[in-house]
């Protein structure tokens, strides 16, 4: 007999631990860190228990009004995601507890734990209202996390993130309301509904909510700004890992539990197009970045495209590939952000121009970074290679080669930009000012080592994660994804390998052309005709939906203010008051205290009354 | 004790008690303050006793008639909605009275201040429990007189002008509404709301009554008096926005158009468009203004649109959402205005261009302000999320997804202008000199912020009662 209340613990334990940590004062910092790490460790244990139940755990009760239930359910997929949320929370807590400045670590750890609780709640929700409750609740900590950055523009970036993600969340609410209108229930449906009519509108709005959270185009523009203005632990935790897990989990549920997305359908095509655009545009922007954190943040966006393409195929291998890529991305992207953060911590800069030759000083950090960079680039036999191949194979199976081509373009530019990043940071001549830089301590290195090891393990022994994923997704037939996962001797894998070779040649050529300056290796692409103009426009934020949206909102506000608000006030303040004053002055003019004038008025009045009586 | 005792007590304890305040003020200032706060607390406690009656009773409604002059009956109408609104308004009113002790100390005319505030709350209670249109109008106008006196409290000439403007606009609306009541009386020969249920009303009468409601609840184009009323002490603006005045119009809408009459079909398109346009205009204006209290006032105008929208839907979801909105908006907006009071007290400034960086000197006020902002925007786990979500869902259920979508976009604008305000005052490069308020004042704003959060976390406590009030309200004219 399973205790149904077990499902509450992944939500409650981190939130309560967060409140406790917030209450522990600064002199007891070590106790606070211990509480946080222990709470996350306990959460992993709880999540593992739930995952290995091998049967759904379900809780439902009427919430605040009679047709709204507080309903939670641990399915194979949701408990799988909760398990990984717990693992990432543990690793990031460990890193932050050791590295972060004391005055901010209390708040950071509190937000991290509360975010973890809300994320678990969102994933375990089995009804739309609790899902919205937890999902939107993450906005609060998102905003507070970015404010913690303490940079001059942190609060502007926090607002930008809040508005963009909030807009997506509000779209999701609109989609839920339409869905409720169609089905008459806020509980998750037993059977998916077709994507047509109001269903199409609901589907589009829900997809905006899910992909916006995951960081897909066009609501992604806060992420590169946050990379500069927010703490690096936040980047590793939220945009790097958690938001991908949440957004892609929700997208999977929307596509296959709430709606039925069939391969080749308009819904499928729309999703794959969104994914392909996200890959190409974001990776193009990543390529020209010269700040390592901004570079990583564009890759965090670009990689979401692969996940969306995979899920958009509607095919078992594509869905599993998308989910596997979600997990892989969370692993290597967290490690990359942590690595970049460690380098910045030691060198006080994240500008690639000023870095170089750090491998000798920070060999473990460098090795972990390079492994993860190779994994994200899809180098055989790492985990990124396996998941990307699954996505590309499925994209080709749909019959639309353009989506596979987008994935390959993404592979070339990803590898080229990581060659640039790794080369600029860790190789070349060590700068004089970095000669005394020392490697990080074991507690900071531990999360990076674990994550880098997972990149290798999940590539070589991909059967382990893929069996977990295939057991989590309701597939119509059993698929053995792992059997040929590392098969490199087929034409499609051959193209992928060719892409990596092109990327290497591109980097080498660029490096040589730029006078052997690694951070300028991408300038050959940057300066291409037409492309250069597009990059200029992008850097001027012409394509930034927030920038343009705020201009529109400000113009609209001024129009509303002067066109309606002030003009209606003018009506009272000027027109009515002035008319009233004139009327009063007229009356004053005829009431000057002369008896003869009053007598005249009486005479006129009596005459008018008499006339009225005579006529009527 | 009889149920009518509690309802009559809720109305007459503050109304009659307010008259005794200046007398006690002659004896002792401290005793006067204590007495005013006690009256506020009593007004909050008395309706609590009514809750169990309306929950237990299957019809959920109690009507008491007391004969009065000219054949008019003073009718007490006790149901879940009236109890809910009276509890919310009196609770926020009591907190504001408590805050006033420190805030208003050192000012002249405190006897008048406390008398007017308590009578203001009492008039709201009278209006809420009135089952007769004439008595509803009577209490409506008492509230108008109190607000007029309180807006011009500092007696500066420009303040008097603003007070006059507020009074004249709301009085104009009320008189037009009275014509609407008289028209209805012509058709039904009664002012008793319980006797005129389901009687068809003319579209013109609805138009006249709506002018009254829109003027009181500051809806475009009759809204401009509310930002101007920001010249009043912050406690008064808090009362106007959170507890009493602007809630009068929306409550009257619910009582008349959800409980008494079926609104003519032609208004079904006009009302949602009008209230959402009002919300949009005021949200836009809030993004352009620079005065803290004007921005917050425009925010109220914007949020009131959601309450109207919820009641307009006449679905259980929408109406319950609107009732919850009264609670959630009341808590958060009271907190915001009282924070504005602390800022004004501590810095002597209200222009956000002259403020900045106050987070360092006013951490508690800043944190409370931020929490209240989250609730007004409608972010979980704050209470504002549930009310906004229910109103939006109710609007979709009522067949107006386009209006619901407009409501969601306005929520995004709400986030933009409220964060602009927060950033300008508490963050940024500025380094304004200022100090935190007294412990009592800060305690009250922290309490309101925490309550905004708790109201969401424990939504079951208020949500069930709001749903009950919606069910009882709507079943009467089905």
Image (tube, rainbow, N blue to C red):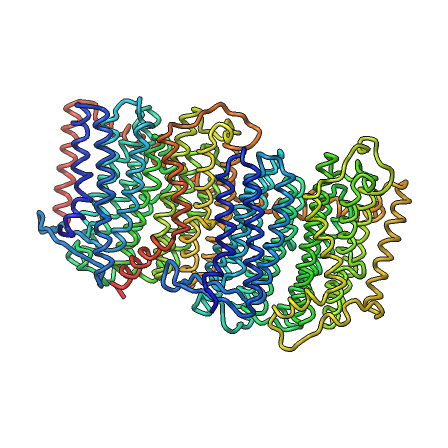
Percent x, y for residue A76? 57, 67
Q: Is residue A514 visible?
A: yes
Q: Quadrant of residue B101?
A: top left
| Position of residue A232 measured from the top left corner of the image (x, y, whole percent) | 66, 42
Quadrant of the image occupied by residue B264: bottom left
- Determine whether, in the image, residue A19 is placed left or right of residue A161: left
Q: Nearer the viewer, residue A304 or A202?
A: A304
For the image, the number of numbered tags is 0
Q: Position of residue B434 (x, y in %)?
A: 46, 24
Residue B440 in picture, x, y percent from top left: 35, 31
Q: Which sits in the foreground, B126 or A283?
A: A283
Q: Is residue A1 above or below residue A152?
A: below
Q: Is residue A56 left or right of residue A346?
A: left
Q: Could you tell me which residue is drawn at 17 percent across and 35 percent down?
A: B17
* A448 versus B443 height, above or below: below
The quadrant holding residue A348 is top right
Q: Is residue A406 visible?
A: no
User: Measuring 43% from the left and 51% from the top, which residue is drawn there?
Assistant: B276
Q: Residue furthest bottom?
A: A477
- Quadrant housing the C terminus of chain B: bottom left
Q: Residue at x 64, y 72 (%)?
A: A265
């Amino acid at each position: 007999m399973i205790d149904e209340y077990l499902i509450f613990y992944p939500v409650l334990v981190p939130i309560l631990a967060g409140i406790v940590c917030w209450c522990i004062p600064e002199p007891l910092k070590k106790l606070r860190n211990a509480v946080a790490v222990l709470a996350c460790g306990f959460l992993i244990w709880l999540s593992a228990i739930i995952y290995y139940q091998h049967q759904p755990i379900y809780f439902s009760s009427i919430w605040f009004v009679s047709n709204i239930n507080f309903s939670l359910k641990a399915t194979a997929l949701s408990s799988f995601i909760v398990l990984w949320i717990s693992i990432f929370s543990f690793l990031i807590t460990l890193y932050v507890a050791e590295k972060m400045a004391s005055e901010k670590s209390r708040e950071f750890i509190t937000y991290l734990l509360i975010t973890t609780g809300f994320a678990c709640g969102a994933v375990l929700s089995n009804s739309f209202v609790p899902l919205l409750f937890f999902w939107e609740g993450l906005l609060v900590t998102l905003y507070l996390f970015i404010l913690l950055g303490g940079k001059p523009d942190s609060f502007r970036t926090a607002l930008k993130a809040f508005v963009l993600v909030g807009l997506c969340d509000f779209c999701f609410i609109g989609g839920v309301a339409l869905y409720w209108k169609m089905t008459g229930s806020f509980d998750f449906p037993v059977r998916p509904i077709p994507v047509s009519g109001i269903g199409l509108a609901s589907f589009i709005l829900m997809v905006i909510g899910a992909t916006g959270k995951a960081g897909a185009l066009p609501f992604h523009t806060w992420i590169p700004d946050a990379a500069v203005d927010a703490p690096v632990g936040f980047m590793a935790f939220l945009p790097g890992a958690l938001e991908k897990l949440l957004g892609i989990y929700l997208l999977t549920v929307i596509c296959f539990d709430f709606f039925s997305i069939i391969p080749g359908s308009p819904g499928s095509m729309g999703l794959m197009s969104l994914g392909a655009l996200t890959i190409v545009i974001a990776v193009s922007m990543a390529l020209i970045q010269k700040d390592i954190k901004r570079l990583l943040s564009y890759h965090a966006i670009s990689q979401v495209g692969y996940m969306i393409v995979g899920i958009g195929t509607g095919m078992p291998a594509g869905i599993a590939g998308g989910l596997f890529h979600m997990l892989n991305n969370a692993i290597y992207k967290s490690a990359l952000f942590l690595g970049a953060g460690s380098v910045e911590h030691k060198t006080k800069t994240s500008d690639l121009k000023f870095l170089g030759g750090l491998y000798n000083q920070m060999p473990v950090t460098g090795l972990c970074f390079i492994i993860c960079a190779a994994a994200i680039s899809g180098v055989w036999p790492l985990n990124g290679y396996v998941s990307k191949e699954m996505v590309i194979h499925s994209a080709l199976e749909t019959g639309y080669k353009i989506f596979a081509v987008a994935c390959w373009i993404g592979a070339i530019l990803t590898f080229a930009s990581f060659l640039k990043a790794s080369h600029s940071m860790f190789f070349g001549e060590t700068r004089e000012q970095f000669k005394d830089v020392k490697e990080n301590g074991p507690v900071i290195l531990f999360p990076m080592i674990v994550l880098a090891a997972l990149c290798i393990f999940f590539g070589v022994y991909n059967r382990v994660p893929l069996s977990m994923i295939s057991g989590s997704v309701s597939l119509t037939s059993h698929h053995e994804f792992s059997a040929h996962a590392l098969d490199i001797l087929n034409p499609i894998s051959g193209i992928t390998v060719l892409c990596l070779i092109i990327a290497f040649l591109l980097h080498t050529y660029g490096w040589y052309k730029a006078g052997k300056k690694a951070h300028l290796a991408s300038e050959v692409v940057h300066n291409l005709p037409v492309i250069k103009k597009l990059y200029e426009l992008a850097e001027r934020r012409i394509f930034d939906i927030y920038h343009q949206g705020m201009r529109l909102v400000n113009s609209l506000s001024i129009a509303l203010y002067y066109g309606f608000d002030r003009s209606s006030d003018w009506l009272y303040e000027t027109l009515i008051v002035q008319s009233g004053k004139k009327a009063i002055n007229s009356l004053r003019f005829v009431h000057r205290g002369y008896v003869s004038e009053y007598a005249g008025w009486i005479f006129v009045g009596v005459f008018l009354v008499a006339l009225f009586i005579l006529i009527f | 004790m009889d149920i009518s005792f509690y309802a009559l007590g809720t109305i007459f304890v503050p109304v009659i008690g307010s008259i005794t305040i200046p007398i006690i003020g002659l004896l002792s200032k401290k005793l006067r303050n204590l007495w005013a706060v006690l009256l506020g607390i009593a007004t909050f406690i008395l309706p609590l006793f009514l809750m169990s009656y309306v929950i237990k009773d299957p019809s959920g409604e109690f009507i008491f008639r007391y004969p009065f002059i000219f054949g008019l009956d003073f009718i007490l109408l006790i149901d879940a909605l009236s109890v809910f609104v009276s509890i919310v308004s009196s609770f926020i009113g009591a907190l504001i009275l408590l805050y006033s002790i420190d805030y208003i100390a050192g000012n002249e005319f405190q006897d008048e201040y406390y008398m007017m505030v308590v009578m203001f709350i009492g008039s709201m209670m009278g209006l809420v429990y009135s089952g007769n249109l004439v008595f509803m109008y009577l209490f409506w106008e008492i509230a108008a007189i109190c607000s007029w006196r309180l807006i011009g409290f500092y007696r500066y000439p420009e303040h008097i002008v603003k007070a006059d403007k507020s009074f004249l606009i709301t009085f104009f609306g009320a008189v037009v509404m009275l014509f609407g009541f008289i028209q209805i009386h012509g058709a039904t020969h009664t002012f008793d709301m319980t006797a005129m249920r389901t009687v068809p009303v003319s579209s013109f009468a609805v138009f006249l009554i709506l002018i009254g409601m829109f003027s009181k609840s500051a809806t475009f184009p009759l809204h401009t008096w509310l930002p101007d009323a920001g010249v009043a002490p912050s406690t008064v603006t808090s009362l106007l926005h959170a507890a009493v005045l602007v809630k009068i119009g929306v409550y009257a809408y619910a009582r008349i158009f959800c409980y008494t009459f079926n609104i003519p079909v032609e208004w079904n398109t006009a009302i949602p468009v009008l209230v959402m346009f009002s919300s949009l205009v005021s949200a836009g204006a809030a993004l352009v203004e620079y005065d803290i209290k004007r921005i917050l006032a425009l925010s109220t105008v914007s949020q009131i649109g959601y309450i109207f929208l919820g009641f307009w839907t006449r679905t259980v979801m929408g109406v319950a959402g609107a009732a919850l909105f009264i609670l959630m908006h009341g808590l958060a907006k009271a907190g915001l205005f009282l924070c504005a009071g602390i800022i004004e007290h501590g810095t002597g400034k209200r222009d956000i261009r002259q403020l900045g960086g106050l987070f360092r000197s006013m951490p508690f006020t800043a944190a409370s302000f931020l929490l209240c902002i989250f609730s007004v925007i409608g972010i979980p786990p704050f209470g504002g999320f549930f009310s906004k979500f229910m109103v939006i869902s109710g609007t979709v259920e009522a067949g107006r997804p386009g209006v619901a979508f407009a409501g969601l976009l306005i929520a995004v604008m709400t986030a933009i202008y409220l964060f602009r305000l927060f950033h300008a005052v508490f963050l940024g490069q500025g380094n304004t000199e200022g100090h935190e308020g007294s412990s009592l004042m800060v305690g009250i704003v922290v309490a309101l912020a925490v309550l905004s959060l708790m109201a969401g976390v424990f939504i079951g406590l208020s949500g069930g009662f709001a749903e009950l009030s919606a069910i009882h309200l709507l079943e009467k004219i089905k």
